[in-house]
Image: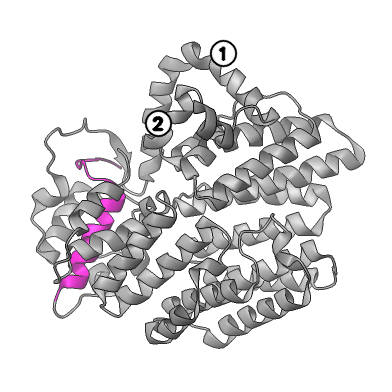
């Protein structure tokens, strides 16, 4: 049954507003209680507050009545958008992608030649983020700040650009630049460039045989795993697609490290879907298979899998398993020399990054008091990339928020913006910002911060 999107607010803003009002009630209303009043499951309310679905108009009115939210706060806009039929459970980004596709169709003829030049340039290194920063890239690169990275990636996965085979060296260099985009939290640029890289990787591996084909499959697996990382950052369900393609390419490569990283990405997608135990079991089983591979690359991936597994186990309350997996990962990090030099994984099992995962675990377990001690012993300077430092500040913000320390929560959010401005626009971080807007404490600069860091329309 179709309903109409009758709101100008994004799904993330709606979800954050609902969460803020629910938490502000005295006594506080839980997600389970709100779900019971609505006749939905608690997981449905969780997805709603995370901005992963758009409720029907009738449901919006019921929520507004239950939480004493004036309906105009959820629906009023100076310039109401045209009503577009969407399904109640359909991802709002899907609708955004359709609109972007329609707009793109009108521009394809005009921009096709420039796009072809940009694709060649990205893969040969003549155009890329570094060059764009220095020389001033074409308008298409400098005007991306308003593009949703998930929309760009989704369009690229399902409507890939045409590409010719490239050399393995070119693919490796392009993959390296894409990883650098991720490490620096340049997600808009990464979302625009990844479809080009993925299409080139697929075309290349289809053209090769033997050992070269295996190497191309390993590069493709790494590229699709990186696409999964970006999709998870944006709370996009296309993480499933990216993880599935990464696994297929990794199996074809016959290499354990790409297979382990692709499996880790699949487990993260499973975790975000609420399948916590299955995700943890998958990680534990695959990490045990990697235990017999002594290479630093395989052990780096195994350590990253254990870190993800520990955080996943915390989501279903298994404290012992969660902390034990992080301890094992830290042990691997101490034993394997130069483990941090392996760039295919996002998180390395250094002492600082293992502590970062312990902080995430305490947040997931609802034990923020224990997280405070972790925050005090971690130095952000021990984290090698802007993306990892922003992750640390995000976890700190969640800890302070759970403790009701709104001033420190706001300070952590500002630290995220300082380290990686695009991180602060992520849906989960936006939810924290919106919650602060409804907290009982007045904080100078908060409204300006919220306006400045809101996702571009």
Secondary structure at badge 2 equals helix
Tell me residue 111's x, y (percent).
Answer: 49, 15
Q: Residue at x 80, y 31 (%)?
A: 167
Q: For mark 2, what is the residue?
A: 98
Bounds of the magenta segment? 1-25
Q: Nearer the viewer, residue 125 or 238?
A: 125
Q: Residue at x 58, y 61 (%)?
A: 384
Secondary structure at badge 1 equals helix
Q: Is residue 359 magenta?
A: no
Q: Nearer the viewer, residue 33 or 362?
A: 362
Q: For mark 1, what is the residue?
A: 113
Tell me residue 112's x, y (percent).
Answer: 54, 15
Q: Could you tell me which quadrant the C terminus lies in?
A: top left
Q: Estimate the spatial distance between the alpha carbons at disc 1 and disc 2, rounded to whole Å.
A: 23 Å
Q: Indicate the colouring scheme.
A: one colour
Decide which of tag 1 and tag 2 comes sooner along the chain: 2
Tell me residue 428's x, y (percent).
Answer: 37, 59
User: Which numbered tag is attached to residue 82?
Assistant: none
Q: Residue furthest right?
A: 210
Q: Residues within 10 Å of mark 1 (few under 14, many from 20)?
A: few
- Judge whether residue 239 can be spotted in this image: no
Q: Residue at x 62, y 84 (%)?
A: 324
Q: Could you tell me which quadrant the N terminus lies in?
A: top left
Depth check, mark 1 against mark 2: the one in front is 1
- Judge whether residue 192 can be spotted in this image: yes
In the figure, 377 relative to 270: above or below?
below
Q: Nearer the viewer, residue 185 or 251?
A: 185
Answer with left or right where residue 304 lies relative to residue 78: right
Tell me residue 414's x, y (percent).
Answer: 33, 60
In the figure, 41 relative to 315: above or below?
above
């Amino acid at each position: 049954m179709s309903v109409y999107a009758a709101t100008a607010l994004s799904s993330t803003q709606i979800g954050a507003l609902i969460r803020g009002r629910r938490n502000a009630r005295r006594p506080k209303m839980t997600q389970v209680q709100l779900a019971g009043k609505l006749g939905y499951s608690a997981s449905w309310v969780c997805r709603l507050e995370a901005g992963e679905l758009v409720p029907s108009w009738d449901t919006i009115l019921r929520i507004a009545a239950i939480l004493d939210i004036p309906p105009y706060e959820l629906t009023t806009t100076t310039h109401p958008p045209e009503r577009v039929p969407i399904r109640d459970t359909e991802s709002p980004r899907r609708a955004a992608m359709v609109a972007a596709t329609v707009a793109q169709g009108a521009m394809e003829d005009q921009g096709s030649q420039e796009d072809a030049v940009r694709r060649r340039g990205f893969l040969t290194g003549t155009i890329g983020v570094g060059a764009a920063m220095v020389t001033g890239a074409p308008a298409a690169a400098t005007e991306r700040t308003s593009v949703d990275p998930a929309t760009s990636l989704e369009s690229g996965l399902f409507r890939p650009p045409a590409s010719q085979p490239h050399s393995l060296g070119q693919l490796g260099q392009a993959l390296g630049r894409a990883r650098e985009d991720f490490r620096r939290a340049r997600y808009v640029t990464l979302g625009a460039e990844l479809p080009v890289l993925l299409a080139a990787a697929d075309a290349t591996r289809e053209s090769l045989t033997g050992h070269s084909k295996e190497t191309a499959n390993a590069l493709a697996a790494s590229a699709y795993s990186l696409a999964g990382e970006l999709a998870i950052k944006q709370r996009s369900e296309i993480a499933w697609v990216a993880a599935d393609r990464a696994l297929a390419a990794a199996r074809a490569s016959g290499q354990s490290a790409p297979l382990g990283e692709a499996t880790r990405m699949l487990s993260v997608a499973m975790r975000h879907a609420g399948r916590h135990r299955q995700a943890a079991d998958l990680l534990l089983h695959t990490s045990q298979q990697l235990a017999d591979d002594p290479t630093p690359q395989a052990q780096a991936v195994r350590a990253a899998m254990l870190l993800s597994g520990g955080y996943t186990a915390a989501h279903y309350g298994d404290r012992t398993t969660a902390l034990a997996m992080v301890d094992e990962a830290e042990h691997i990090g101490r034993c394997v020399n130069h483990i941090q030099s392996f760039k295919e994984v996002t998180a390395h099992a250094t002492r600082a990054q293992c502590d970062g995962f312990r902080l995430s675990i305490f947040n997931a377990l609802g034990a923020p008091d224990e997280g405070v001690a972790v925050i005090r012993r971690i130095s952000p300077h021990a984290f090698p990339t802007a993306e990892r430092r922003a992750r640390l500040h995000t976890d700190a913000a969640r800890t302070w928020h759970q403790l009701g320390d709104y001033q420190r929560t706001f300070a952590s959010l500002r630290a995220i913006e300082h380290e990686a401005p695009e991180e602060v626009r992520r849906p989960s971080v936006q939810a924290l910002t919106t919650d602060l807007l409804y907290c009982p404490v007045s904080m100078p600069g908060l409204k300006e911060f919220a306006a400045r860091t809101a996702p571009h329309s």
